[in-house]
Image (spheres, grey):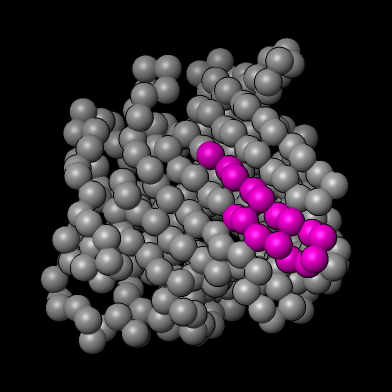
Amino acid sequence: MLRSSTVVRSALLLALTQVLAAPVSPALPTAAYAQTTPQSGPQIDAQINGGQPVAEQASVVAPRAMAVPFGIGERMDYDVRFLGGKKGVGSMEVKEVTDVRGKPAWHTVFHVKGKVLLMINVNIMLESWFDVATMNSLRFYQNQQYTGTKKIQNIEIFPERGMYKEDALDERVTVANPLDDGSFLYFVRSVPLEVGETYTFSRYYKPDKNPVKITVIRRETVRTPAGTFKTLVLKPEIKAGGLFAEGKAEVWVTDDSARMVVKLESELPVGTLSLWLTKFHLGTPIKR
């Protein structure tokens, strides 16, 4: 169990600063081996997860696309657990590649919804749009509602000018190569991780919330409803507070270059909230 901290403000804010890794298909869970052949690709993945192959999109971005281990249509679903029981559901999804101010951008969504106690509801949605060529954040939307708190923000980020704008407020200075709460997760999935190492960097789009620290604390085999996975366990330290405030959380990612999030734990004032992977669908990479 982790110590008490503030309630969720953001989700899955992660980061590292090493060279990007080439994409590799994620290791399938032990439970999935009997259902598959050595083949891979969107058709096989759709059969594993009960979905349909995702149509290939955005071939126009091929000359500029950065190598990443995720693709269009990728989705991970979770049970939300509290005090040992299921209290809601969550998901992470790569919806599409779309245009943001003339730039092809990944569009991702993180959503958690549930009731952790009789009078405590949690409903969090984070959407990120980030450049396929640089992974720099271009747009960020968050809608966070839980008992006693409601926060809705629309943020436009302009890396080329070094500025960002939040709702109706004046523009403010951002950092070089900015990342928002959601795009950080996809960034960390694209870089190497070494057990025992702590990574520090200053890419969060709000300068005063830097630096961010991520420590890879151990390897661990985790059994989830989606299967059994070999994982790396990460402990983030985020000045922005929320889900990863002051290292009050742990995140389990698959021990391969895909870095799928299979489990997450964080402390609320009333106890530990956790997400457990229930199923996943691998996406279709864009052409490079």
Assess whether residue 122 is covered by the magenta stretch. yes
Front residue of 160 and 142: 142
Height in image: 65 above or below 246? above
Residue 139 lies, with reference to residue 21, above or below; the image says above
Q: Which residues are magenta?
A: 112-127
- Residue 280 locus on image (x, y percent): 38, 65
On the rendered structure, is 60 left or right of 90?
left
Front residue of this view, candidates 18 and 149: 149
Whether the magenta-drawn stretch holds residue 30 is answered as no
Q: Is residue 192 visible?
A: no
Residue depicted at 36% across the width and 79% down the height: 29
Assign the N terminus to one quadrant of the image: bottom right
Residue 144's x, y, as percent? 69, 43
In percent of width and height, residue 65 lies at: 29, 36
Relative to the observer, which residue lies in front, 248 or 270?
A: 270
Q: Nearer the viewer, residue 161 or 243?
A: 243
Q: Residue at x 46, y 63 (%)?
A: 77
Q: With respect to residue 92, does 217 lie above or below?
A: below
